[in-house]
Amino acid sequence: MRKQLPLILIIVLAAFLRLIALGKVPLGISPDEVSQGYSAYSLLTTGRDEWGIVWPVTSFRSFLDYKAPLQTYLMIPSIALFGLSEFSIRLPSAIFGILAVWAVYLLTTELFGKKRIGYLAAFFLAISPWAIQFSRTALEVNLSSFLFPLGLYLFLRGLKKPILFYLVASVWGINLYTYHAAKYFEPLFLIFLLFGFRKQLSKIETKTKIKASLVGLLIVAPLLLATVFGSAGERARDLLISQLNVQQTDSIAKLQYFSPLNRIFVGLPRVFSNKVVFIIKDFTENYLSYLSPSFWFTEGGREITYSVLPGIGLLHLFMLPLIVYGLYRLIKDKNPRLNLLLCWLFLAILPAALTKGGYRPNRVGALLVFWEIIAAFGLLKLGELFHLAKRRYLAPVLAMLSLAPVIFYFNTYFFEYPFKYPKALSFGYRDLVTKINGYPKDQPVIVDRGSNSQTFFAFYNQTDPKVFQEYSAIWWQDIQKSRPQYLDQLEKYRLGNITFKIFNPGTDLVEGNLVVIPSEKMSDTYKPLIVDRILYPDGDVVFYLLEQK
Amino acid sequence: MKKNNFLFSLLFLSQVFWVVKLNYPPSYEQLIFPLTATWQLWLLRLLTLLVVAMLSLQIGKLVSERGRLWYWFLVLLSPLPALLVMSYPLSALKLAVVVIIIKKIGPSLLSKIAGLALIFALLIVVNIKFLHQAPALIDRLSLPVIQAELTDRFNKEYLLSPGNYVPLQIKRIAYNKYFFLIKDVLEEVLRFADLETIFFQEIHPQNQKGEPIFYWGEFGLFALALYVLAVRKDKGRVGLLLAAAIIYFITSDGQPLLRHPVTFFALSVLIADGIPVLLAKRGSVRIVAVAFILLALYGALAHLVDRLERPQYWLDNKPMVYQIYFDSVPLDRYDVVYVADLFGQGPNYCRFYYKNCSKFIFDNFQMVELEPLDNALYVGFSGNFFGITTRDNFDQRPDINYAGHRIEFIQSAMIRDNVANGYGQRIIHGAKTE
């Protein structure tokens, strides 16, 4: 027990940072979190999701974005215990975030054979901005931060103790149900492992290998079938860079048409401006965005909706020299783990680079624990270089130096972020639902549809899932007719007395209707009709409630 | 060898061809020199070409014998040297400062530190004195500005409800101007290593334009060469060159290309040293390296075509604005010419195009607010004529009434991109009608 004290302390620290005020920070909650929470609630109470589908295995229809299923299932016990709330739906992610600290300790110790590096990696992960932010929101990708390193650890251990391969197959099989990028990254990484460790693997009994493969296949089979024949890969397909939009194809066509090279030979410009070149270039550009130091250390991600703080790096600044030196020493010393780690890095970026837009932290989730491992190795090597073991007085100095960025981050995240960026996480729906519940139950309510607002109403009202399923059956009929990409692209749809549609003052502002519009749609004309407001913590308006008297 | 010479000549000529064919108007940097005629501009370009060639030769000596061919391949493939020659003589001179000092630096640590400090000081002086450009780093070093930011943060936190109850003493560990200073400086330094900027054409909406430094295919070569460098015992002067590149980057401002010339040469040396090692390997590494070389060639060719097709898409359009402003003003018909000098370089450009600028008045006029003079020509963007809210959304009639006066549009031309924020893209020469 005493031997494990450093690890226990680190895990306690990680738990504290992930669980404290979990339901309140970050302020607001994203539609994706709420939707998963309500699906879990629906399963818990009716055995069907909100669309009436019995225990979906490979994906949840959700907003027609077909979400990976594991997180939703993990929410069920949490909701059963604590009820349907922001806290209960974020709890599984937070627990996996804590477990990830343990997994990274195991993996790092196994990789380098030194517990000290394991402790350092675990500590870095415990205080990592990226890991904390992802653990405190119900993001599917965060589950992988535990499952992937655990699987890799078991694989490395399995080379000595083959029985563990059954566990590897199970853990990594389940990991494929966590988020879409894992479906691309993990098979590629597995191929590398099988190739890179072929000598060690050849010494293992064939029977064990076949049995373990069968276990893995059994777990993955539904997903494979759904990806090939069904809807599980639909969201991922939509996001691929190969799906060029009209502007992009138009721009390529213009470049071809107006090229002076047409004078030499019609069709020659196609050699230089074509879809393939465009996609390769886009891919490379995306890929490089994930290797940008600014992305990791100073600027962070470019989409604040996924619990990312603008202008704050995903990693602490003090880790930069540790990572640089760690990578340098891995390469310089030709460390036996170098290929494995480099492969992890370069393959993890692949799925992210294949999708539209760069600088998206949630798409490189496979790297959630990677940099901490490198930084831990780098710190140990720097310690050796500067003989830190002998110069013990330097340790507190270094600790103090790293304390400033850590304090800066925590103050920003826990105290400034909730006030600065509540809009990023759809703040205001809780208050809106409470306000609307104060009006007569039969009064028609028109909600200018935001991003899938219906899910917030169902969530905060704890709408009976059976009632929701009746409405979603009607929506599904409309979807079959108009084939929108996402549910909220339907012209209009109804849940009880609430209709979700694009605000049209001519038809909506009639006597008897209660109309909800976001502040950006407010104009002087409607000001006399305001009956209520929903406010951000800083006093700005989120929603206006209008009524024609 | 002959084949290589042929290839290099071809690459060199393609760059020269582009510069000559384009015949772009002079840049701000060129007009810091007292140019008054086109032949002087070309003479300056020729001199810059000599400087860039000499510097390229000198830096080439830092490359191993085996890598030198590849070094020239990389240098001639990039549009950067051609751009320095065409538009940026002072940047070439700044590069010369760096190269000369790097060459003089001895092997001792003290000599390296002193050399880099000298580079830092000289670059700052050149930027401030001649380019009138506040280096990006200087902006970040202002303690009063940081103090103001901190005060603002504290003031805002006091207003929060529920408030921030972290003890001030603890918060002060991070919320002090020195930590913010280090953080800001590091942020600036980290931008140096933004690979997307170095290997892609970054078109920044505010910063206007950016020519590529390397082509995206070359990133693969860079990654492999970096690996070669890391395992190599003798790292030569690449480290020193990279340190100088960081200094150059943080002490300059403007589009990425103008902040990265030293980076370009440093990485060219690094990649050139790596390529022969990669090609000497057997199997997949060699195949991948060859594939990347071919990709780089393809990228360069594709870009050359694009540059010929639409140069204004890539280049800074402000010199084009001044060319349209001044190139065809019928001076003899007017007593005075009012020029809306939005970029503050009007007198220099006027001197280049006319020598005698006594008839010109440089002022960011707003036609809606003034009484047009007789026999005066007004030159500016549509925003100057119609107000900045109107921009280009005006009735395309040849003349228009202003407070009872009719203004005739003598000529108008569109600039490719919006360089005058809010003023539109149409440049107009207008005068009051009789």
Image (cartoon, rainbow, N blue to C red):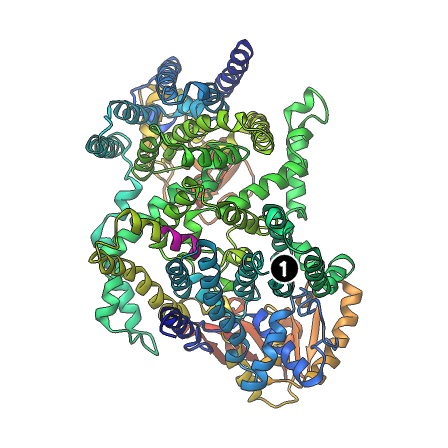
Residue A317, x across and y down, in percent: 35, 54
| Amino acid marked by disc 1 | His
Query: Furthest-top residue in view?
Result: B2
Residue in front for this viewpoint, B247 or A226: A226
Task: Please name the residue shown 43% across and 23% down the image.
Answer: B81
Please provide the residue range marked out in magenta. Answer: A370-378
Name the residue rendered at 28%, 43% in the picture. Answer: B137
Residue name at image x 20 percent, y 30 percent: B111
Q: Chain of mark 1?
A: A
- Residue B249 seen by the camera: yes
- The secondary structure that most of the magenta stretch takes on is helix
- Placement of A22 over or under A206, stated as above or below: below
Q: Quadrant of the C terminus of chain A?
A: bottom right
The residue carrying mark 1 is A180
Q: Position of residue A158 (x, y in %)?
A: 58, 59
Residue A75 included in the magenta stretch of the image? no
- Secondary element at tag 1: helix
Q: Is residue B394 visible?
A: no
Horizontally, is B405 left or right of A408 in the view?
A: right
Q: Is residue B114 left or right of residue A176?
A: left
Residue B66 falls left or right of residue A199: left
Q: Is residue A171 above or below residue B407?
A: below
For the point 66% across and 89% down, which residue is it? A442
In the rendered image, residue A415, in percent from the top left (x then y), is placed at: 36, 71
Please provide percent x and percent y for residue A355: 61, 51
Count of numbered tags:
1
Q: B346 or B159, which is in the foreground?
A: B159
Quick one: label 1, few (<14), some, or many (20+) residues within 10 Å?
many
The quarter of the rendered structure image containing the N terminus of chain A is bottom left
Residue A448 sits in which quadrant? Answer: bottom right
Say which quarter of the image contains residue A253.
top right
Q: Measured along the vertical axis of the image, is residue B336 above or below residue A106? A: above
